[in-house]
Image: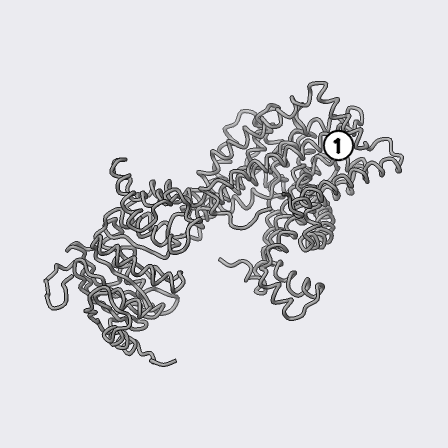
């Protein structure tokens, strides 16, 4: 993504066109998403911000191909999304790692089409990248929450996807670990540029991580506003610009500044 | 369409059964119609009611005796770790011994008759219920116990006010499973050690004339009653006061 | 350095067992029974059986019967359970049959078993199969049903076809529950074999018990047989629990099971 002051036109990676989602219930169907339009550029880090239950995860699931939208389209690289695909991988909270496989086994999970040599190389590379060297033969139950989260990221990256979907991945971690994991994520991103769609309800998280923040309203969810975070990394969490952006988002969501 | 699914498999089974029965060479295996007629015959001869009552009588006594002894003992053992440590290995040793293996001892102590069968059923239900009660107590979350103590509850109050209610969901599951076991054992015991009841019916019908239609009729009754017993206890699990214990 | 609780853990049960044996011996002595055996008589009975070479023979027979019925139940039950768990439609179709058949003691199938298989090894084998089959099917079915959808989603995300998904995600995720079902089924198989041997065959531990009584009121051999049954059953159970300690499945057993 371009450095401040220099705009480089990037191709669209993910195009969401007028996506709406209605869930059938016993009574009238619940409208969860209302006509979402979003254009995500290649290599962009976009945060989808909103309170819990507003439909952000539903949107992510639609873009990832796990749900079919009631109306609208999603195009990735110009192709309509029809189902899940290894070119766009979900990262959940650390509960998504497979407990019956070691670290190595998990990272290798999607690599079944590669030769043994290639697989070993990839595993070694990504285990090192996420900082789990030495734990190759450990089982997830022996790892901490943060380590399990790293494992899940490694597993996702190992198949070399174009797009990563992260659905509140750090939600189950304590706040200190969360800070650590955020900078780890950015570090990994510097090494391997991917388009990232990141769902969160944490305002600070979105300002710390994203290139752009998409603020969602409560149900039925629509895009209230898209905020450009034009701050170079590393972002100073005490800088006036950071605080300004954060306040902007607080206001947009409609929350008080004082408790 | 979905509603019909369960019936479709049953219907298929009955159809296969019918065909199999008519293709056999020995002519002894009954087809579904003969089984139904067999049931009617038993009913008319008054044997059905008599045997069902006999089996239920034995099950009830053996089971209830087990319940009123096993649960208190199990709760106590669960509470006093020492007690559990002392007795658990013994219990684990006795558990794998088929209740039927106690038949000679049962007959020795109680003679051939109802008491022996009731003894067997008692044994079969007692051990699993004790173990389950022990475990239920051990699985009460310590936070609940600490809250109870915090509010100044004595040991006895703790038992009735915290431990018992907290263990209740698991206990009811154990009660259901033990009732199922008791029902299995009563039938088996009746095949060997007594002269009435559904188990006896099965053995007798074969021995006294190869009446396999009555044999299968008996098996069907056994299945039905066992199912009714199981469903009845499951109703307990549905009570709102207990639903919390069966969270998804 | 053994701690106090370690010592307690061994001494308490040992002490209680010793106490139980003592009470038993005293009860026999003071009730002047001449039928019920004392602990010593039971021990001598065991020795006698060993001496006659019959013991190993009977134990082997019982174990052999368990093995045939049990492994057949395993081979058929796990795939059946997986199928039922994976296709809820199949499960609701077969559920009534399962619920009706479950309360029927395997032993009640004896007359039919003899009709179909004659008085041979196949008859008790069939009963053991029946006894082990249902718990295995139910456990496998429940194991599949409780696989978190997150795992299935991840599997699909990585491009796994359905057969691959079943093999690499569903089965390993369901394995802990399947293992519990296997252990329970083994316990049931052991109970059923003893019961079956009391009726239809002429070897094995169940037969030993019935025969010892019928052929001469040898209650010392009866009790000896019972103890042996208990010990072997316990050993089988402990062996099965060992499987639950493997690291690929240990994650599924967070609580202590009894």
Above or below, comparing residue A184 to residue C142 in the picture? below
* Residue located 20% across and 68% down the image: A231
| Nearer the observer, B12 or C42 | C42
Q: Please provide percent x and percent y for residue B59.
A: 70, 47
Q: Which residue is mark 1?
A: C223
Tag 1 subunit: C
Determine which quarter of the picture holds residue C169.
Answer: top left
Is residue B39 visible in this depiction of the protein? yes
In the image, what residue occupies the spot 26% across and 62% down?
A70
Question: Would residue B60 appear left or right of C127 to someone viewing this image?
Answer: right
Q: Is residue B17 above or below residue C45?
A: below
Where is residue A25? Give x, y as percent.
37, 65
Q: Nearer the viewer, residue B69 or B163?
A: B163
Location of residue C185 in the rendering, given as x and y in whole percent from the top left corner: 56, 38
The quadrant in which the C terminus of chain A is found is bottom left
Nearest the viewer among B35 and A224 is A224
Does B160 appear above or below B72?
below
With A225 as the anchor, is A137 left or right in this view?
Answer: right
The residue carrying pointer 1 sits among few (fewer than 14), some (14 to 19) or many (20 or more) residues within 10 Å by Cα, namely many
Instruction: Quarter of the image for the N terminus of chain A: give it.
Output: bottom left
Q: Taking A70 as reference, is B105 left or right?
A: right
Q: Is residue A201 above or below residue C11?
A: below
The image's colouring method is: one colour
Q: Secondary structure at mark 1?
A: helix
| x and y percentages locating residue B3 in the rendered image | 44, 53
* Residue that sits furthest to the top in the current view: C52
């Amino acid at each position: 993504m371009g450095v401040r002051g220099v705009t480089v036109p990037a191709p669209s990676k993910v195009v969401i066109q007028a996506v709406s989602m209605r869930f059938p219930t016993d009574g009238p169907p619940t409208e969860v998403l209302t006509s979402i339009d979003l254009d995500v550029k290649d290599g962009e880090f976009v945060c989808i911000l909103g309170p819990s239950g507003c439909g952000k995860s539903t949107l992510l699931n639609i873009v990832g191909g796990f749900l079919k939208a009631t109306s609208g389209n999603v195009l990735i690289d110009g192709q309509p999304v029809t189902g899940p695909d290894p070119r766009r991988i979900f990262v959940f909270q650390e509960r998504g790692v497979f407990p019956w496989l070691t670290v190595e086994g998990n990272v290798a999970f999607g690599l079944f089409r590669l030769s043994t040599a290639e697989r070993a190389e990839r595993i070694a590379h990504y285990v090192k990248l996420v900082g789990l060297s030495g734990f190759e033969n450990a089982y997830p139950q022996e790892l901490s929450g943060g380590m399990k989260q790293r494992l899940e990221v490694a597993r996702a990256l190992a198949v070399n996807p174009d797009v990563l979907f992260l659905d509140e991945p750090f939600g189950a971690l304590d706040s200190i670990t969360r800070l650590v994991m955020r900078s780890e994520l950015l570090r990994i991103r510097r090494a391997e540029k991917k388009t990232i769609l990141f769902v969160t309800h944490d305002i600070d998280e979105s300002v710390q991580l994203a290139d752009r923040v998409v603020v969602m309203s409560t149900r039925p969810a629509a895009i209230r506003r898209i905020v450009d975070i034009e701050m170079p990394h590393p972002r100073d969490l005490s800088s006036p610009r950071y605080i300004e952006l954060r306040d902007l988002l607080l206001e947009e969501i409609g929350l008080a500044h004082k408790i | 369409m979905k509603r019909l699914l369960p019936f479709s498999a049953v219907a298929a089974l009955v159809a296969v059964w019918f065909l199999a029965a008519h293709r056999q060479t020995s002519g002894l295996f009954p087809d579904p119609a003969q089984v139904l007629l067999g049931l009617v015959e038993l009913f008319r001869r008054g044997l059905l009611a008599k045997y069902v009552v006999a089996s239920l009588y034995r099950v009830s006594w053996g089971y209830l005796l087990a319940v009123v002894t096993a649960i208190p003992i199990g709760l106590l053992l669960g509470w006093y770790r020492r007690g559990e440590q002392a007795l658990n290995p013994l219990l684990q040793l006795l558990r794998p011994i088929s209740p039927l293996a106690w038949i000679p001892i049962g007959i020795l102590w109680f003679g051939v008759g109802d008491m022996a069968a009731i003894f067997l059923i008692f044994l079969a239900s007692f051990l699993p219920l004790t173990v389950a009660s022990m475990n239920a107590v051990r699985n009460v979350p310590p936070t609940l116990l600490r809250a109870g103590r915090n509010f100044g509850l004595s040991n006895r109050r703790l038992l009735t006010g915290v431990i018992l209610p907290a263990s209740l969901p698991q206990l009811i599951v154990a009660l259901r499973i033990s009732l199922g076991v008791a029902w299995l054992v009563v039938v088996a015991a009746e095949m060997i050690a007594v002269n009435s009841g559904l188990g006896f019916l099965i053995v007798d019908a074969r021995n006294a004339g190869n009446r396999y239609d009555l044999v299968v009729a008996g098996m069907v009754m056994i299945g039905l009653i066992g199912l009714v017993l199981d469903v009845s206890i499951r109703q307990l699990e549905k009570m709102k006061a207990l639903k919390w214990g069966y969270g998804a | 350095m053994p701690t106090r609780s370690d010592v307690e853990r061994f001494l308490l049960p040992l002490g209680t067992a010793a106490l139980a044996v003592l009470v038993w011996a005293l009860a026999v002595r003071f009730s002047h029974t001449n039928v019920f055996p004392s602990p010593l008589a039971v021990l001598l009975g065991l020795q006698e059986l060993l001496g006659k070479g019959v013991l190993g023979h009977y134990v082997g027979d019982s174990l052999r019967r368990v093995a045939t019925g049990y492994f057949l139940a395993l081979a058929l039950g796990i795939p059946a359970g997986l199928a039922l768990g994976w296709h809820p439609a199949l499960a609701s179709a077969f559920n009534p049959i399962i619920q009706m058949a479950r309360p029927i003691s395997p032993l009640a199938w004896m007359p039919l078993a003899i009709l179909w298989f004659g008085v041979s090894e196949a008859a008790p084998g069939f009963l053991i199969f029946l006894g082990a089959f249902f718990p295995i099917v139910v456990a496998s079915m429940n194991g599949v049903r409780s696989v978190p959808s997150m795992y299935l989603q991840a599997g699909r995300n990585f491009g796994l076809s359905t057969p691959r998904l079943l093999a690499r995600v569903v089965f390993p995720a369901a394995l802990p529950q399947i293992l519990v079902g296997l252990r329970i089924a083994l316990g049931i198989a052991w109970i059923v074999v003893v019961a079956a041997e009391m009726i239809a065959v002429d070897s094995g531990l169940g037969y030993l018990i019935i025969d010892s009584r019928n052929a001469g009121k040898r209650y010392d051999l009866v009790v000896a047989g019972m103890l042996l049954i208990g010990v072997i059953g316990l050993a089988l159970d402990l062996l099965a629990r060992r499987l639950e300690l493997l690291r690929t499945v240990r994650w599924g057993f967070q609580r202590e099971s009894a």
